[in-house]
Image (cartoon, rainbow, N blue to C red):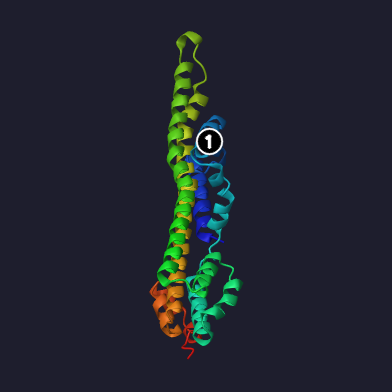
């Protein structure tokens, strides 16, 4: 569970609602004032137009991945560099004892498709340069797909304030029409509310919804890319016959020092298998 995302978004909503309640008599909170910030026309214009532009900007194949994006966003346990390093060291031990062909069984047991592909590349005795090229191309294409997904929410973040301004213009036009003295004037309140509240809704959509989602998806992408780079370096070192202990030390340079220190007793597991 992505607790920081939940705390941040829920906290921002709560703080905003409390701020909306200020302004009552004697500075007391007035919950009924929250109703002043609800305007159906503003919601319809800002949210509706923003969603329609997102739909217009991306193909169905990208839009159908939205549920998957939220699953990725909320999952913080999918990429563990230290666990991957442990697996690679174990593979190195097996390869030094029994040869690269012995890794085929380990590869078939691997749930991570990229990890499995990399293992099979060296089991099939591919040239080292060719194997690295295949793996790096996979990483590049994966990063491009992830950036496209995050770009969808960037698009929403950019157009939401614009449609907030569109709603403001609509409200102002209606307000000016209602000020026509020949028609006897009119109720300016609803038109003014639409004019002001749509800008608020646009900012909320951009900075409390779309922006954090895009940032979180990019963070997940960086975590995944780091793990994939560790896998590539580890697999290529195993193919070259690296010592398991030296391999662990090499791969630990990919993670922060505090994470290396936290691995503690795991180093014993990666000792030389000779």
**Residue on which disc 1 sits:** 52
How many residues crowd around disc 1 within 10 Å: few (fewer than 14), some, or many (20 or more)?
A: few
In the figure, 267 relative to 112: above or below? below
The answer to which of 208 and 196 lies nearer the viewer is 208
Q: Is residue 78 visible?
A: no
Q: Secondary structure at mark 1?
A: helix
Q: How many marks?
A: 1
The answer to which of 84 and 153 lies nearer the viewer is 84
Query: Residue 8 at what x, y percent from top left?
Result: 49, 54
Query: Residue 140 at what x, y percent from top left?
Result: 43, 58
Q: Quadrant of the N terminus?
A: bottom right
Q: Residue shown at 52%/87% (left/top)?
A: 97
In the figure, 3 relative to 48: above or below? below
The answer to which of 256 and 200 lies nearer the viewer is 256
Q: Is residue 4 visible?
A: yes
In the figure, 128 relative to 222: above or below? below
Query: Residue 116 at what x, y percent from top left?
Result: 55, 69
Q: Residue shown at 59%/50% (left/top)?
A: 67
Q: In screen coordinates, is 32 left or right of 130? A: right
Query: Residue 195 at what x, y percent from top left?
Result: 46, 28
Q: In screen coordinates, is 242 left or right of 102? A: left
Q: Residue furthest bottom?
A: 274
């Amino acid at each position: 569970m992505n607790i920081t995302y939940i705390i941040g978004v829920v906290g921002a909503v709560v703080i905003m609602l409390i701020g909306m309640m200020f302004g009552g008599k004697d500075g007391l909170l007035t919950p009924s004032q929250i109703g002043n910030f609800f305007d159906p026309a503003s919601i319809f214009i800002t949210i509706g137009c923003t969603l329609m532009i997102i739909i217009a900007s991306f193909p169905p194949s990208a839009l159908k991945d939205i549920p998957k994006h939220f699953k990725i966003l909320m999952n913080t346990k999918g990429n563990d560099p230290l666990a991957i390093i442990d697996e690679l060291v174990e593979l190195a031990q097996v390869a030094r004892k029994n040869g690269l062909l012995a890794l085929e069984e380990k590869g078939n047991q691997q749930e991570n498709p990229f990890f499995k592909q990399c293992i099979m590349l060296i089991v099939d005795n591919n040239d080292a340069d060719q194997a690295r090229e295949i793996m790096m191309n996979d990483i590049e294409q994966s990063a491009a797909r992830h950036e496209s997904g995050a770009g969808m929410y960037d698009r929403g973040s950019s157009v939401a304030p614009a449609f907030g301004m569109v709603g403001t213009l609509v409200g102002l036009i209606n307000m000016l029409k209602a000020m026509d003295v020949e028609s006897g004037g009119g109720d300016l309140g609803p038109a003014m509310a639409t004019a002001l509240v749509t800008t608020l809704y646009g900012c909320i959509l951009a900075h409390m919804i779309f922006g954090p989602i895009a940032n979180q998806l990019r963070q997940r992408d960086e975590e995944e890319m780091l793990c994939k780079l560790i896998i590539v370096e580890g697999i290529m070192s195993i193919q070259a016959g690296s010592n398991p202990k030296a391999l662990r030390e090499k791969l630990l340079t990919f993670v922060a020092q505090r994470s290396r220190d936290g691995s503690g007793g795991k180093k014993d597991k990666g000792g030389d298998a000779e």
